[in-house]
Image (spheres, helix red, strand yellow):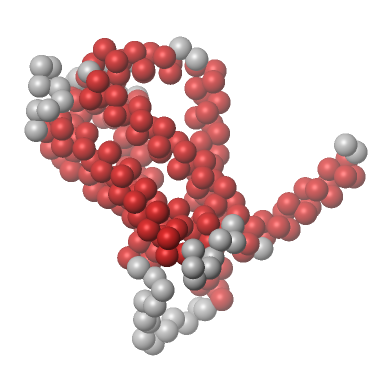
Amino acid sequence: MSSVALDSHLHKAIRFYQASIGKKAVMAVTAVVLLGYVVGHLAGNLQVYLGAAQMDRYAAFLHSMPVLLWIVRAFLLVCVVLHITASIQLTLLKQEARPIGYVKKDAIGSNIASRSMIWSGAMIAAFVIYHLLDLTAGVANTAQYQDLHAYENLVYSFQRAPVSVFYIIAMLLLGMHLYHGIWSIFQTLGFSHPRYTPMIKRAAAVVAILITAGFISIPIAVMTGVVGENL
């Protein structure tokens, strides 16, 4: 491909992103990637119910491919940055389009999940940073942290009530974020129709509830002694 053609494609991509539809498309694509990661992460975390040996083997397996692991981490980080950037830019565009708010604002066609997307996203991002420091780097749990002992690290972390409460609140916010985000993906892709939208919203709610329940079940299981009682 010639440099002229490359410049032309790059210019078109920049122009596309500068429009609100371009930002929405970036948010939708990155949301799909991040949703896939969330589901995969949940599947990995639920192995805690299979015992320490299985979960520790899973952690060792992931770290047995360091190059691939860091490529995936870098890709996810890029998706997170793009997702957050597009979200902030879309919010600013809406504010510029209507700098003076309504005297009386009726929440027609919206709900608490849609109205709090940017705030729930910010709180989830803050939680993810802490979660990485706690269970991946061990910085927030230096007294108990053991490298590649995923089961033990998770149990020791969730035995601390403030950590479990923080985790549960973050997962509830994640569920709200997922609910609105999932059906918004279909809306961005053009699947917006009076016949299909209610079904898509119900499906998004089911997926969000299942994911949230799966994540929340883990700290509850630790705090009640169902998991980790022998440690």
Q: Residue at x 22, y 34 (%)?
A: 218
Q: Residue at x 51, y 24 (%)?
A: 70
Quick one: quadrant of the N terminus? Answer: top right
- Judged left or right of residue 123, residue 7 is right
Quick one: quadrant of the C terminus? Answer: top left
Tell me: residue 196, above or below residue 175. Answer: below
Report the label total.
0
- Judged left or right of residue 95, residue 165 is left
Q: Quadrant of residue 203?
A: bottom left
Q: Position of residue 45 (x, y in %)?
A: 31, 29
Tell me: residue 38, above or below residue 203. Answer: above
Q: Residue at x 36, y 30 (%)?
A: 43
Q: Position of residue 192 (x, y in %)?
A: 54, 65
Q: Quadrant of residue 113?
A: bottom left
Q: Residue at x 47, y 64 (%)?
A: 197
Q: Quadrant of residue 24?
A: bottom right
- Judged left or right of residue 177, residue 73 is right
